[in-house]
Image (spheres, helix red, strand yellow):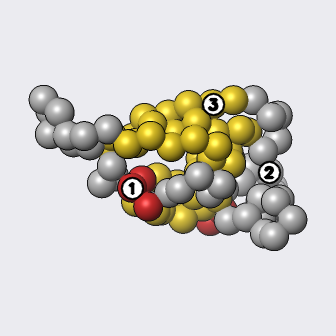
Amino acid sequence: MVEVAQQFESMADAGAFKTFPQQAGTIRKNGYVLIKGRPCKVVEVQTSKTGKHGHAKCHFVGIDMVTAEKLEDIVPFSHNCDVPHVVEDGFVV
């Protein structure tokens, strides 16, 4: 019987360690947030009051740090958002 040595190489990276959770209500303009899985710098934040369904909402407008696209997201005020670790130069760690 032939034995085949298996070698495991990490070809994919989930990137889970590159973000941390932060409550949506604490994220401010000029901060950072993941919008649709992309690291963005927040350029506008609007907060709405509680409505029919009982949650206040945060509307984020951000500029993608890689492609410079404008992205938007609406998140309940008390829920957690993923925030990328960013060094002083503006690069995602």
Task: Give 43 or 93, whichever is nearer the viewer.
Answer: 43
Residue on which disc 3 sits? 71
N-term mark: 1 or 3: 1
Which residue is labeled 1 in the image? 25
Sequence-wise, which precedes: disc 2 or disc 1?
A: 2
Residue that label 2 marks:
11
Residue positioned 87% across, 65% down in the render = 89
Q: Secondary structure at mark 1?
A: helix
Question: Helix or strand or loop: what does disc 3 sit on?
Answer: strand
Q: Residues within 10 Å of mark 1 (few under 14, many from 20)?
A: some
32 relative position to 58: left or right: right
Quarter of the view holding residue 63: top right
Q: Is residue 84 left or right of residue 57?
A: right
Foreground pick, 50 / 23: 50
Give residue 6's position: percent from left, percent from top: 78, 59
Q: Position of residue 5 (x, y in %)?
A: 81, 62
Can you tell which mark lies on residue 77? none
Residue located farthest toward the right when viewing the structure as drawn? 89
Residue sitting at 64 percent across and 43 percent down?
43
* Residue 19 visible, this orientation: yes
User: Is the Cβ of the residue at disc 3 closer than 8 Å to that at disc 2?
Assistant: no
Residue 62 sits above or below residue 52 on the image: below
Q: Quadrant of residue 7?
A: bottom right
Q: Quadrant of the C terminus?
A: bottom right
Q: Position of residue 86 (x, y in %)?
A: 73, 64
Question: 67 or 18, which is in the foreground?
Answer: 67
Q: Secondary structure at mark 2?
A: loop
Give the vertical position of 27 relative to 66 (above or below).
below
Q: Amino acid at mark 3?
A: Leu
